[in-house]
Amino acid sequence: MTVLYEINTLVWLGELSHRYGRPVTLGNVPGDVWDSVALPGVDTVWLMGVWERSPAGREIALRDPGLVASFRETVPDVTGADIAGSPYCVRDYVVDARLGGPDGLAAARAQLAARGVRLILDHVPNHVAPDHSWLTSHPDRLVQGTADDLARAPVDFLEAGAGIYARGRDPYFPPWPDVVQLNAFSDALREATVATLVSIGDQADGVRCDMAMLLMNDIFEKTWGDRADPAPAEDFWPYVIPRVRARHPDLLLVAEAYWDREQVLQQQGFDHCYDKRLYDRLLHEDADSVRAHLAADPAHQRGLVRFLENHDEPRAAATLPGDRGRAAAVAVATLPGATLWHEGQFEGRRVRLPVFLRRRPQEPVDESLRDFYGRLLPAAAAVRRGDWRPVTPTGRPDDDTHRNLLAWTWTHAEARHLVVVNHSERPARARLPLPWDALGGRTCRATDLLTGAVYDRDGDELTDSGLFVSLDAWGCHVLEW
């Protein structure tokens, strides 16, 4: 199953350059650094932010008081040299020369491939930079405005290239100030998107599509129906994806997706979609809510991306500190579907860095957390094989703490595993019915892959009553039987 590791490429290379006392680009990253990236179970590295950023977009960002305030809040001594512009304000889908250019990316891909790891890169289908060549060469690919629009709503429109264009947005928030909206209903844009994705597929093994649901016909029409062409009969991604797969049949396609559009986007061709619902439930809701979420169709769940943080979300060490964060990490690491880890998560970084910046504050390493993840990643790689099945805890009528436990099994011809997580701040006890035959008449031994603890249990009791489990607040087991 896919395990992604996201790296902020610009920041990462800057810190490597400082460490080694020389400029480090994608083409000359030391081998031992690539070894440290190819973590146990990680099979895909997402190099976030490799494309050419927009100087025009950077200038717009520098004039935005809210953005500048966020930069200063994160890096109090920030200077203009630290502000690189947004990696999602793309001027061209060419690897930035400062990062090593196309040759450097090819070398990085080869280094990862030698370690059995795929490379995934970003695509931003909804918008482009205000100095992108299409504003002069192909204005029909963008949502256009008029002089009256600009005078009436300068926050919504800007003058650039060959005319006046709408700023990029989603239907629920104000426009992003530094980008120009693409027209998802334009045949020319759809053809150009195919060409762009094919080009990315020439350079990488996968693509993470930013805010993929914004291009869906009904969402785009809700946002831009009065300004776009008539909605085509075919939705955006069913047009684009088959044409891309004709050139790159094995290309891994990951959709950043929200608003319960995950299943539809899977049906439209994406391999995986963000599971923001699980993230929100782990942060804000109880075990019953999480359990209900995990009752979805297994095929749908295999197409989800589980995560606790990424560049858009706060750092997990800040939102899920201590044992609570460890319990949530065990959950996302051992569920079906893809898992997304974020560089710095294992070391306990707490500061979420705006993607505009090339430098982040120094933070102490949480050695105990790093040790925990050092045990969790290989444990998860061992567990996630075969058939996954949720387990429903039961308890005594006078003790409802069993409701706070989340549990599931993985059954493979060579191994049986049980994962139990106490998703609460109080101790919990339960009986767990195990789905395995032929346990009776023998002693069964379970080894916790996180702690090394060994438990011997009577097989007849396991068959008749289930496994008794008692866990402290936010406690967990990853048991190999």
Image (cartoon, rainbow, N blue to C red):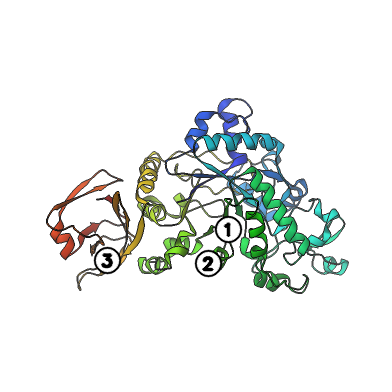
According to the image, label 2 marks what residue? 263
Please state which of the two labelled residues, at mark 1 or mark 3, is closer to the viewer: 1
Q: With 123 as the anchor, is 376 left or right in this view?
A: left
The residue type indicated by label 3 comes to Pro
| Image mark for residue 255 | 1
Q: Is there a contact, CB below 8 Å, between mark 2 and mark 3?
A: no
According to the image, label 3 marks what residue? 393
- Residue 118 lies, in percent from the top left, at 54, 43
* Residue 388 seen anywhere in this rendered image of the structure: yes
- Residue 77 lies, in percent from the top left, at 62, 40
Please state which of the two labelled residues, at mark 2 or mark 3, is closer to the viewer: 2
Q: Residues within 10 Å of mark 2 (few under 14, many from 20)?
A: some
Which one is earlier in the sequence, the residue at label 1 or at label 3?
Answer: 1
Q: Residues within 10 Å of mark 1 (few under 14, many from 20)?
A: many
Q: With 147 as the anchor, is 261 left or right in this view?
A: left
Look at 62% across and 40% down and name the residue there.
Answer: 10
The residue type indicated by label 1 comes to Ala
Give the alpha-carbon distance from disc 2 to disc 3, as whole Å.
Answer: 28 Å
Rendered position, 357 above or below 473: above
